[in-house]
Image (cartoon, rainbow, N blue to C red):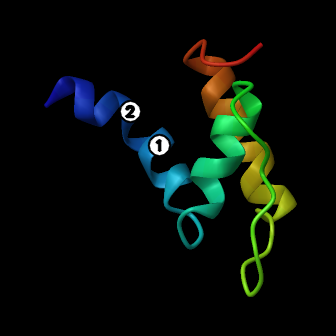
Amino acid sequence: LQMQLHYLPLIDALFAETNPIPVKCAMAAMGFGTDTVRLPLVTLEEGHRQNLLSLMRQEGLVD
């Protein structure tokens, strides 16, 4: 339970928008592929992207 609560903000950020948008953004930040998606999807909103990347930095997932 402690681990789940620790990662809850990151989990919430990964579900801030319709999947696979946040997951693709996270994977691209780690060097796996790109964050481009096909229509009708669009890239992650800038505010959500900044939040996700900030949380990933806190966890040491990206530089």
Check disc 2 and give the amino acid type. Tyr
CB contact under 8 Å: marks 1 and 2? yes
Q: As displayed, is residue 39 above or below residue 49?
A: below
Nearer to the camera, 5 or 43: 43
Check disc 1 and give the amino acid type. Pro
Q: As displayed, is residue 36 above or below residue 38?
A: above
* Residue at the left extreme, as displayed: 1
Q: As displayed, is residue 51 above or below residue 16?
A: above
Q: Residue 4: x and y, percent? A: 25, 34
Q: CA distance from mark 1 to mark 2?
A: 6 Å
- Determine the residue positioned at 79% across, 44% down: 34
Q: Residue 2: x and y, percent? A: 19, 25
Image quadrant holding the C terminus, namely top right
How crowded is the residue under tag 2: few (<14 C-alpha within 10 Å), some, or many (20+)? few
Local SS, label 1: helix
Nearer to the camera, 22 or 50: 22
Local SS, label 2: helix
Q: Which residue is mark 2?
A: 7
Q: Residue 32: x and y, percent? A: 69, 31
How crowded is the residue under tag 1: few (<14 C-alpha within 10 Å), some, or many (20+)? some
- Determine the residue positioned at 71% across, 32% down: 54
Task: Tell me the tag on residue 9.
Answer: 1
